[in-house]
Amino acid sequence: MPIQKARLSRSEEAEDRQCLREMYHEGVVDISDDSLDGAPALDISVIGGPETLIFNLPSGLAGYAITVRLVAGKSGLILMEPEIATGHDHQIVLESFDLGGPVCELGQCWYRKSEVLNDRFPLKFKQRGSMVEAAILATGLKPIPARYLQGMTVPFTLTFWDQFAIPIGVEDGLSVDRSTTPRSRLARPERSVLDQGEIPESREPFGGDNPNAQTPLRSEPGTKTL
């Protein structure tokens, strides 16, 4: 269920918008009129089921694959790297694939680099309504608690910050996968941000074999195509 953290009162929101207008007219910030109309800055949807997992890593710790759809509610929105937390682990960090090849791998999961958000922050949305759908891959410092069995759901929070240090968060659930069966992909994003110059699209359909593997990886039954 989407939530907004650190929500201001109506009077505080009005005061905040007035401050933004003054800063805009003084040339301190570059914002457009739709940044001042009180609309939510960002709509976050977590794609559930096999697209959003907590799973075992060879190290014994937990890996995270979270597929999200982000829609900008305001022009000029900039998102900083998000924070992920569960009830048992508040030190979950995003993996970096910047120096790797065309495939991002974490444990049993792998994606095309164009389908992963990790190295694309700060994420810029030029226009209201611009959308991106992609995965976030992360590693925790603790294993999956024994009380969470295969197929159960682990509650988690995902929090972004915009360029004004305002947090925008969502609460949802991670599907527990204790298997080590390789997954060829957990999701197929429909499209990336409409401003193609800002964030590159995932242009080619993706199926078949992992280019880094010696033998083909089979798709997990039930994986859906978006």
Image (spheres, rainbow, N blue to C red):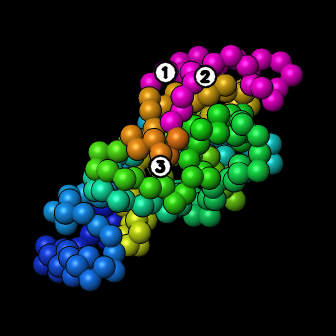
Let me know if residue 36 is in the magenta part: no
Looking at the image, which is closer to me, 23 or 5? Answer: 23
Instruction: Check disc 2 and report the residue beneath it.
Output: 206
Residue at image position (74%, 31%) is 180
What's under tag 2, amino acid-wise? Phe
Q: Are marks 1 and 3 in contact (CB under 8 Å)?
A: no
Asked if 33 appears above or below 173 in the picture, the reply is below
Residue drawn 41% across and 44% down? 195
Percent x, y of residue 43? 32, 49
Q: Residue at x 57, y 64 (%)?
A: 90
Residue 225: which disc? 1
- Which marked residue is nearer to the observer: mark 2 or mark 3? 3
Q: Which mark is residue 198?
A: 3
Residue type, label 1? Thr
Q: Secondary structure at mark 2?
A: loop
Going from the N terminus, do you reach mark 1 or mark 3 first? Answer: 3
Inter-mark Cα distance, 1 to 2: 10 Å
Question: Is residue 208 one of those drawn in magenta?
Answer: yes
The image quadrant that residue 30 belongs to is bottom left
Left of 29 or right of it: where is 94? right
